[in-house]
Image (cartoon, rainbow, N blue to C red):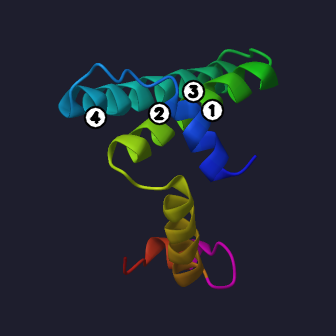
Amino acid sequence: MNFTDYQALAARTLGRDRTHEQQLANAALGLTGEAGETAELIKKHLFHATPLDRDAIVKELGDCLWYIAAFATVLDIEMKEIAEQNIAKLKRRYPEGFDTERSRNRTE
């Protein structure tokens, strides 16, 4: 599946009865909540000796992806554009791959 297909399929479950502002708030708050749930799983693994549950991580990351797709759809942005611009930025920032020194001294 590619980003275009995913975004179209995810958009089927958007609350279309909400205002533009409500859709934006839902996307922002939902993404924050799901990112927090993902972080909670990692915290429990690292500090509470809980086994890392791969299926739970996949589920939470999927929920994060849904909210990113919701943001993109509400703002009339293709997820493909988001992905392409992010990779272009990373290539500019780290032309040879991640580098600690370049990370500390970023210009953008």
Measure the C-alpha gap from mark 3 to mark 4.
16 Å
The answer to whether residue 96 is magenta is yes
Which amino acid does the dot numbered 2 rest on? Answer: Tyr
Measure the C-alpha gap from mark 2 to mark 4.
10 Å
Q: Position of residue 63 (x, y in %)?
A: 57, 27
* Mark 1 secondary-structure assignment: helix
Q: CB atoms at circles 3 and 2 under 8 Å apart?
A: yes
Q: Depth check: 2 or 33 in front?
A: 2
* Residue that label 2 marks: 67
Q: CB atoms at circles 4 and 1 under 8 Å apart?
A: no
Q: Depth check: 54 or 40 in front?
A: 54
* Residue that label 3 marks: 63
Give the magenta part as a residue range.
Answer: 95-101
* Residue that label 1 marks: 61
Measure the C-alpha gap from mark 3 to mark 1.
5 Å
Q: CB atoms at circles 3 and 1 under 8 Å apart?
A: yes
Measure the C-alpha gap from mark 3 to mark 2.
6 Å
Q: Position of residue 96 (x, y in %)?
A: 69, 84
Q: Position of residue 49 (x, y in %)?
A: 74, 16
In percent of the image, x 42 and y 77: which residue is there? 106
Q: Is residue 29 left or right of residue 66?
A: left
* Residue that label 4 marks: 24
